[in-house]
Each structure stands twice: as C-alpha cells, then as structure tokens.
Amino acid sequence: MTTRARQTMRVALPWMLWLGVLAVATFLLDERRTNLQQVHVVLVFLLIVLGGTAYGGRFLGLALALSGFVLIDYFFQAPYDRITVGSSLDWFVLVAFLATAGVTTNLVARAQRAAARAQRHASEVARLARFGSELLSAGRAGEALGAIVDAVRETLAAQRCFAYSVYGNGEVELLVQRGDGTIPDRRLVEDVARTGSDIAEAQDGTIVPRASTTAPLQDDDDATTELSGLGFRRDVPVRALWMPLRVRDRIVGVLGAVSEQLLDLDEARWRFAHALLFYAALALERVRLVAATEHADAMRETDRLRNALLASVSHDLRTPLTTIKVLAQESARHQSLEVAVSNARIIEEHADRLARVVSNVLDVTRLRAKTLTVHSEFNTAEDLIGAVVRHCAGVLGDHALERQIEEDRTLLAGCFDFVQSLRVLTNLVENAIRYSPPGAPIMLSAKREDAQLVFEVADCGPGVSPAERERIFEPFYRAPGAAPDIGGTGLGLYIARALAEVQNGTLTYKPRSPHGSLFTLRLPAMDASVEFDESYAE
C-alpha cells in the first residue's frame, strides 16, 4: 500500500466507523420507537456526534449532526417514515438537536486544536530547553552554533544552512555551513545585516513581497494570509530565507536556510525555527567572545615571551660579549702569542655559546610558527646513542656517561629525524651534567615498548619539585633559586619537547628513586627487518 493510500484510509476509517455506528443505533432505536421518547433518541445521537467529533474531527461531527437531524425526523417523529414535521414542538426538537450538536462539535474541535497546540508548544519548549542546555554545556562554542544550525536546517527542511557573523563595520564572515552546495551571494546577507529584517527569496530568485498586515496565523485562514511573525505571503513559493541574529538589539549575525525545493514554512516549524534564532545569536556571540579571549591570551603570552626573551637573552648575550671584549683587550695589551692562543680558545667557546643562544631563539620562533620541518627516516637506537656520546664527550668532565641498549631479538630501530633527535638527547644529557653533583654518573638507555622506541636520561641531581615538573618545559623558565650563571636561556627543555612532538613522539619527566631526574623520550619504532617506507615519515 502506498503512502497516499494509507493516508486516505486513515481519513476514511473514522467516517466509515461512526456512520456505521449511527446506522446501527438508528436500527436498534427504530425497533423500540413505540416505547421511546424523542429525548432518548436525541441523547443517543448527541453521544454519537460527540464520539465522531472526538475521533474524526469537526467535519465528521457536523455530518453526523445533519444525518441525525434527518434520521430523527424520518424515524422518530410522527408521521413516521416520512420527511415531514408534524408540529411546532417537533421543529423545536430538531432545531435544538442540530444547534446543540453544532455547538458541541465546535467546542470539541476547538478543545482538540487547543490540546494539539499545547502539545506542540510543550514539544517546542522541551526542544528549546534541550538546545539551551547543549548551548551551555557544549565543550566548544563552534559546536553549539553548529548544532543549532543543524536544528534550523532540519526544522525548515532546507538543503543548506549558513551562519554568518556581522561585524561593526558591516562586513560579514561565514562561520558555519551545513549541507553541500555553492555558497550563496552575500548581497542578501549584507542586506539583512543592514536592514535588520528577514528577507525571503522566491524560487525564481526574486525577493518575496511582504504581506500588508501582521495578523497571527489561524487554523482556518486561507492561503494568502501571512505566516505568524514572518510577514511574507504564504502563496509565494520560498526557496531561501535569511534572518538576523540579535543580542540586546544589536545584530551580531545572519542565519540563512536555502533549498532547491520549497522550504517548509508552516506556522509550527517557523515558530520553532524563529525561537532557535535567540540561541543561535547567543552561540555566535559566544564564538566571537571565545575568539576575542583567545586573541587576548595570545597577546598576553606574546608579551610574556617577549619580556622573558629580553630578560634571558640580554643576560646570556651580555656575559659572553663582555668576556670576549675583555679577552680581546688583554690580547692586544700583552701581545703574547701564548696569551692570544688561550684567549682565542675562550673567545671561541663564548662565540659558540652566543651561536647556541641565537639558534635556540630562532628555533622557538620556527616551532611556534610551525615552520620547522623534520625528515623522519629509518634509524637505529645504537647509532643515535653513539652520536650523543661523541657530542657530549667534551662537556662530561668528571662525569661518566653509562650506556645501556636492550636488544632481545632484533636491532632497535625507529622512524625519526636523526639530527633533531640527537639535539633532544644531547640537550637532556647536558642538562643532567649541569645539575648533577661532581663525579655523579649519567645514565643513557634505549629500549622498545610496543610500537615506541624509548630513550631515558637519568641523573643523580636534586630533582624537580612537584609544582615545577610541567613548568620546566615552558619557554624561558628558570627554577626558583637557580644560579644566574648556570647557563642556558631556559629554552632547552621547551625545544626538546617540541622537537619530540613534531616527530609524533613525547618527552616526559618523572622523579628518580631515591633522588634525581628521569627524562623519557618516546619515538615511533620500526622493525629492523621491514624495509623503510616513506609513509612512516608522514
């Protein structure tokens, strides 16, 4: 059975049922009409009219009332079995029955409409409450706005729905788009933002004229009456509707619904969609406030980093420059080859220190701008640790660098950038040397855990207090009480963690028992027997 046939059957079934009930009641009453009074028949017919109206609507009730009028006159008023009225009293009975049935039918139908409206309103209130709670509890402002745009699209049966932000200078920006298709011309969006009124677009692309009145829509209004609160004539097909979003009488955005077919703009759908505009405006305002807050936070962070950079770099640049200047003056004054060679060596060390400071600052800039690229490829843990030992040989002093590589069955290998990973481990080892007591050993180990290659650098230093364990990875951070000449700009651990993350790895800290620090670098592992594929590097 088709959908249209089912709808026809749904409408015809109450008519067939209650007309059948009227026929059966008439037959049974006619069998005993000599023992009945007209009032008994009228009461039975009124009950049938009420039941038919309750189940089939006003028109069925009126049809039953008219049928009852005829049946009472034909079967239950003398002369019987004739359509005629014998006395004025009989006229009074018939008219009273018809009037009572008509009034009752209208009252029942009105009560049904009121109940249906109350049910629709309750459903709308429940949906609005749900959207309000989602708006307040949404993790991100954009998610709340997207959910409301989806609801408007579903309510109006639109193919595409858009949410634009309107700025003080009149410019508009598309924030949310739902549905596939081209983005409409912004002219209508700008007109809505400028005029602050709804704009509808007809199927041929012209602007739909507004109705002349703003009377609310009634259930029995004709097709030319405007929609409640909409102001557009209902007899004009509408394919696009653009509505302003207001917060405290200020237009903050425009919401549009567009469809290749006609939009479903009945009263209930329009009323619910228009109620959603309030939530859409709040969600859009929240998106703008979050963006403004994030911008302000970024500016504050930029100022903090700038101040920290100036404070840290000025100290780290001033000390080597002062030393270089003093040594150069001493070499010029003594004019001794031995003094010059010694000073030249020291000058070179300080020049390298200056180069590291500048390099670290440049790396921070690249990392924050996400322009630092890495080249991940097949490498082994043994090669990386060997390179770390060679790079740190000159700074170990009286410290011993103990190495440990766990190789159960196969060679430890991974997919990582060798140069950048070498920088990370060298930084960790130098950091351990800097904070370890004289003669304390530094441990460097490598092992594999599932799909990760794990490098650990452990020392016997004082460790890090719980309050500082995450802050040590912040740029330009120095632990409270640290000596001003301990070396470094406070960028080493920040750069090390960032270099690990751009290689799909991690760098973490945890205290070492009984005292000391343990830094763990995790990088993607590979099987040594598998030929390297470029897809690992992506």
Image (spheres, rainbow, N blue to C red):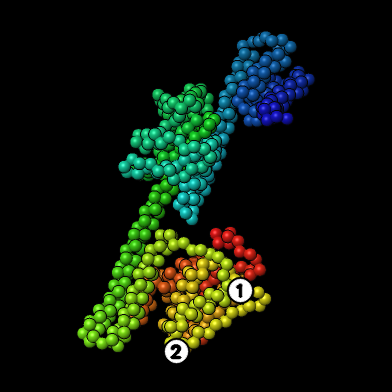
Q: Residue furthest right?
A: 31
Are circles 2 and 1 on residues that touch, CB within 8 Å?
no
In percent of the image, x 35 and y 44: which residue is there? 167
Circle 1: residue type: Leu
Position of residue 462 measured from the top left corner of the image (x, y, whole percent): 44, 84
Position of residue 182 measured from the top left corner of the image (x, y, whole percent): 49, 37
Snapshot quadrant of residue 75: top right
Instruction: Examine the rendering and report whether any part of residue 80 can be seen.
Output: yes
Q: Is residue 45 above or below residue 394?
A: above
Q: Considering only order in the chain, which callout, 1 or 2, is on the residue closer to the N terminus?
A: 2
| Distance in Å between CA atoms under marks 2 and 1 | 30 Å
Position of residue 490 measured from the top left corner of the image (x, y, whole percent): 38, 73
Circle 2: residue type: Asp
Res. 412 mark: 1
Snapshot quadrant of residue 484: bottom left
Q: In the rendered image, which residue does mark 2 sit on?
A: 398
Depth order, front residue of 469/65: 469
Rendered-image quadrant of the C terminus: bottom right
Depth order, front residue of 339/454: 339
- Left or right, 397 with respect to 312, comes to right
In percent of the image, x 49 and y 73: which residue is there? 422
